[in-house]
Image: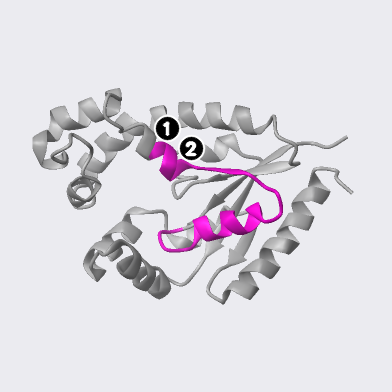
Amino acid sequence: MTKRLTIGVTGGIGSGKSTVARTFATHGISWIDADDVAREVVEPGEPALAEIASRYGDRVLTEEGRLDRRALRDIVFRDSVERRWLELVTHPRIRQRLLEHLQRMRADTAPYHLLVSPLLFESGQHELVDRALVIDVPETLQISRTASRDDVGEVQARAIIAAQMPRSERLARADDVLDNSGDLDALQRQVAELDRQYRALCGEA
């Protein structure tokens, strides 16, 4: 009998979590990304957006009334009190939405699926998974990737990294580690091996 597993995928910013998830998808594995859900819960009409706008005003809203994520990021990554307030507003809503998504994914035919989350441990979302896969890259690579991808400066990239769990602690809590500092071929080989391991854990021949 196949046991269905939820694998938590996490790593610091710029570690390549989405690329890893897409590579697992080539093996028939579905995933839910906590970042996507985090965007869902602050869409116009959502209670979380109303609370955020009430606290910070129009400076965190676009002309269309949507959340200006960069403006909010500038606030919360400079002030740990504001970051904690935002987490208290959004994390419970994200968790509930994730549970709904995971319940739907358990109905598919794959033996396991992924919960991709940059804050898997920090947010308590590790409680929703059976194993934790940490995507690991050196901090210098995190900074360069983040700066080029998100159009942020090195100072802000370092602030984002500093706000996340230290690399050493994340690795200590991992059940599995994927080194994503190499090329795409190296990534694909590691994912293929992990896919075999996870299928074996699920009891699939």
Mark 2: amino acid: Gly
Which tag, 1 or 2, sits closer to the chain's start?
1
Marks 1 and 2, how far apart at CA: 11 Å
Where is residue 130 shown, x and y percent of the image? 66, 40
> Residue 37 in magenta?
yes
Horizontally, is 193 left or right of 61 in the view? right
Dot 1: element: helix
Near mark 1 (Cα within 10 A), the count class, few <14, some 14-19 or many ≥20, is many
Where is residue 165 shown, x and y percent of the image? 42, 54
* Of residues 186 and 65, the one drawn nearer to the viewer in this rendering: 65
Where is residue 144 shown, x and y percent of the image? 35, 73
Residues rendered magenta in the picture: 12-38
**Image position of 18 with respect to 61: above or below:** below
Where is residue 189 shown, x and y percent of the image? 70, 69
Q: Nearer the viewer, mark 1 or mark 2?
A: 1
Q: Quadrant of residue 91?
A: top left
* Of residues 96 and 58, the one drawn nearer to the viewer in this rendering: 58
Give the label on residue 82, or none.
Answer: none
Q: Quadrant of residue 61?
A: top left
**Image position of 131 with respect to 56: above or below:** below
Q: Residue at x 64, y 52 (%)?
A: 25
Mark 1: amino acid: Ile
Q: Identify the residue position indicated by label 2 in the image.
A: 124
Give the label on residue 94, or none.
Answer: 1
* Of residues 175 and 92, the one drawn nearer to the viewer in this rendering: 92
Dot 2: element: loop
Image quarter of the N terminus: top right
Near mark 2 (Cα within 10 A), the count class, few <14, some 14-19 or many ≥20, is few
